[in-house]
Amino acid sequence: MTLESLFELILIDANKVNSPHYLERAIRLSHSGSIIIDDNTVHGGSVIDSGTHDPNVIGFKKLFR
């Protein structure tokens, strides 16, 4: 299956480690004015923990960069 259309709204709710890759794909499938939502972005506040080794949090931090 391939996706070739542009979307108005994209929800990313999947493997958090790969969130940066999903965001890249979502950007290619969107247009100016589209909304992209990433579920669990705050991740219980752990995204601001600079010493975490949680792969999910590391994936989120890459997403934000």
Image (cartoon, rainbow, N blue to C red):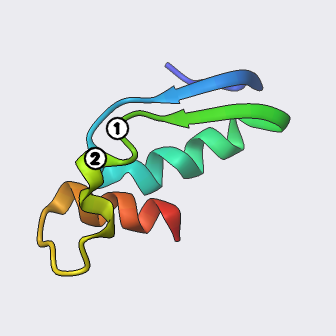
Q: Residue at coordinates 24% horizontally, 59% vertically from top-left?
A: 46
Q: Give the structural element (helix, strand or loop) at label 2.
A: helix
18 vs 31: above or below: below
Q: Give the structural element (helix, strand or loop) at label 1.
A: loop
Whole-percent x, y for residue 59 in the image:
31, 60
Q: Residue at coordinates 51% horizontally, 63% vertically from top-left?
A: 64
- What's the mark number on residue 20? none
Instruction: Check disc 2 and give the amino acid type.
Output: His
Whole-percent x, y for residue 34 in the image:
78, 31
Taking the image as shown, residue 32 lies to the left or right of residue 30, namely right
Instruction: Check disc 1 and give the amino acid type.
Output: Asn
Q: Pointer 1: residues within 10 angstroms few (<14), some, or many (20+)?
A: few
Report the residue marked by disc 2. Answer: 43
Whole-percent x, y for residue 1 in the image:
49, 19
Give the total of numbered labels: 2
26 vs 55: above or below: above
Report which quarter residue 27 is drawn in: top right
Q: Residue at coordinates 36% horizontally, 58% vertically from top-left?
A: 60
Assess whether mark 2 and mark 1 are in contact (beta carbons under 8 angstroms): yes
Report which quarter residue 29 is drawn in: top right
Q: Pointer 2: residues within 10 angstroms few (<14), some, or many (20+)?
A: few
Report the residue marked by disc 1. Answer: 40
Taking the image as shown, residue 22 lies to the left or right of residue 52, namely right
**C-alpha span from label 1 to label 2:** 5 Å
Taking the view exactly as shown, the residue that stands out farthest to the front is: 45
